[in-house]
Amino acid sequence: MVVVGGGLIGTAIARGIAERGARVTLVDDGRAGTASPVAAGMLAPATEIAPTEIGLLQLNLASLERYPEFVEELSGATGLPVGLRRSATVSVAADTDDVARLDDLAEILAGCGLSAERCTGRQVRRRVPLLAPRIRAGLVIERDWSVDNRLLWAALRVAAEGSGVVHHHGTVTELVVEDGRCAGVVMADHTRLPADTVVWAAGAWAGEVVGFDLPIRPVKGQVVRLRAHDLPIPEVTVRAFVRGFEVYLVPRESGELVIGATVEDRGFDTSATAGGVHDLLRDARTVLPITAEYEFAEVSVGFRPASADHSPILGPSPIDGLVLAVGHHRNGVLLTPITAELITDLVVDGTWPQLGASFNPYPESER
């Protein structure tokens, strides 16, 4: 068994399959821009919702339900922290137009049966005292959480190794297809890794090698990290509409604040730009003025692996023996538990529930 892609999704799948008794090699090319260490770690099926992505909601909610048990088991197996925070997300608005967007979000959530508490500016500032006086309205979503994705990824890698997963570092340049079935992969150094099944979890680069139409493109995001040190930090994730733009501020137990993220269709451009950093810091300061006093710690660039409709592509592919786990876009951290569960069950048991089938665009005739 070979799993291609060493991010959160690929590592969780490799570990899940190995725990079921299979011998697994996890191929990790370590490319700059992998989303797993860059993401902010929001577990936000409600506040990430978009009118065109309602079909993704049930998958997101199912994965969030699994998160407490997922991280508890992982922490127990490794003894490592994973940084799950079950504190609310507070979405806020800064001017009249932003309040209208917040109202639209509240209506979408209500239409989906999701609970959210509307607040006036005064009420939301009582909930988050560090908010700027100009904040005019808020929406509190108790079940949108966050996790420290860097801690989670580190724990997953340790757990995978403990389950017997073998790491192979390098880049896949070719799929081995024999008699119509995927029989392994070839690396850039010409090493061949044979396998009965290959799981393709190659992130933003997923469409480069497979040889059929797999419409995954990179969506660049710049993320800033600040350190509060002895200064106060919000206890909840804050998402804001600011002059028509969106910004989120995600606190960590360590005193770090993660601010993100730009959305740029720039291909695999790894450069951090002055404009991108400026806009994030400007909008963060508008919402949370104290951020101007925090230490600037880091700017990082990652690539969201986006499909045409921003939903993941999961399950069987047009090539027998090649299984897909790609296209998670901005929900990769959130969808890690459910993706690992679905793909593990498919590979080991051959089961594929309707929840997963909804995210497979390849009809039986193409497989």
Image (tube, rainbow, N blue to C red):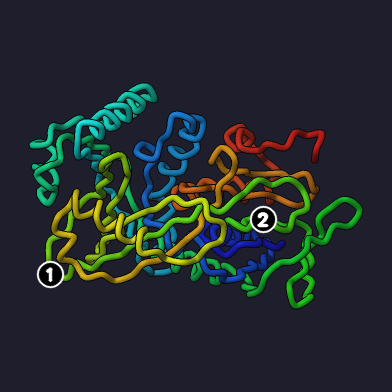
Are there few (<14), some (14-19), or many (20+) residues within 10 Å of tag 2? Answer: many
- Pick the residue in front: 298 or 231: 298
Image coordinates for residue 11, horizontal then vertical, percent: 55, 62
Q: CA distance from mark 1 to mark 2?
A: 44 Å
Mark 1 vs 2, N-terminal side: 2
Seen as rendered, the residue at the extreme bottom is: 189
User: Could you tell me which residue is drawn at 58 percent across and 59 percent down?
Assistant: 10
- Measuring 23% from the left and 35% from the top, which residue is drawn there? 139
Judging from the image, what secondary structure is the residue with disc 2 in? strand
Q: Residue furthest top?
A: 111
Q: Horizontally, is 210 left or right of 17 in the view?
A: right
Residue type, mark 2 in image: Trp
The residue shown at (51%, 30%) is 55
Tell me residue 9's x, y (percent).
54, 56
Q: Which of the 4 image quadrants contains residue 92? A: top left
Secondary structure beneath label 1:
loop
358 left or right of 269 in image: right
Quadrant (top left, top right, bottom left, bottom right) of the N terminus: bottom right
In this rendering, the answer to whether 327 lies above or below 228 is: above
Q: Residue furthest right?
A: 179
Which numbered dot is residue 75? none
Q: Is residue 85 visible?
A: yes
Left or right, 180 with reference to 165: right
Amino acid type at image mark 1:
Asp
Residue 340 in picture, x, y percent from top left: 56, 51
The residue at the point 32 percent across, 43 percent down is 245
* Quadrant assignment, res 61: top left
In x, y percent, where is residue 167? 62, 73
Which of the pair 191/273 is nearer the observer? Answer: 273
- Height in image: 347 above or below 355? below
Q: Which residue is mark 1?
A: 230
Q: Which mark is residue 200?
A: 2
